[in-house]
Amino acid sequence: QVQLVESGGSSVQAGGSLTLSCATTGFTYSTYCLGWFRQAPGKEREGVAALDSEGKTTYANAVKGRFTISQDNAKNTIYLRMNSLQPEDTAMYYCAAGAWCHILRLDMLPPDYQYKHWGQGTQVTVSS
């Protein structure tokens, strides 16, 4: 059974930084995508960043240059380092995992349907 558990969400002031973590269990595929998504109140869920098993990464334009996705295979953990946070980054952040997935274009996030496993989310609130 695959489980994803996020942590690290908090309240910060604009300009601050946070690192979100996502501990995964039971996800043992050799070809995969790992991603971070977010959903603000009243808005649709949007992709933020993705990483695939070949080491490619891609980001939403809104976070490019500020956020960094990474993984620690030894710890089975995905990270999202967020710098220069702005109030518009306030949202519930979710990690997701999908098997047999590749990042096909470095300017495009994998579609949502590629991800079959989702965490419960961690809240990030950025105040001005």
Image (cartoon, helix red, strand yellow):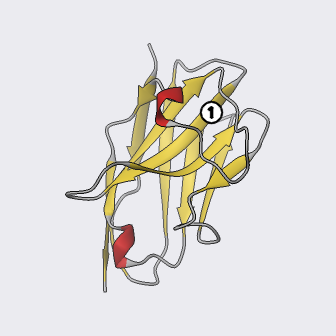
Residue 1 appears at what percent x and percent y?
44, 13
Relative vertical location of residue 13 with respect to residue 70 in this rendering, above or below: below
- The one nearer the camera, 87 or 112, is 112
Residue 107 appears at what percent x and percent y?
69, 54
In what element is the residue under mark 1?
Answer: strand
Q: In the rendered image, which residue does mark 1 sit on?
A: 33
Residue located 52% across and 18% down the image? 26
Q: Which image quarter holds the C terminus?
A: bottom left
Relative side of 27 to 57, left or right: left
Relative vertical location of residue 89 with respect to residue 101 in this rendering, above or below: below
Q: Residue furthest top?
A: 1
Relative side of 78 to 20, left or right: right
Relative vertical location of residue 21 with respect to residue 19 in this rendering, above or below: above
Residue located 61% across and 67% down the image? 64
Residue 7 appears at what percent x and percent y?
40, 49
Q: Quadrant of residue 31?
A: top right
Relative vertical location of residue 102 with respect to residue 57 in this rendering, above or below: above
| Kind of residue indicated by mark 1 | Cys
Relative side of 42 to 29, left or right: left
Residue located 47% across and 35% down the image? 112
Q: Residue furthest right?
A: 54
Q: Is residue 76 visible?
A: no
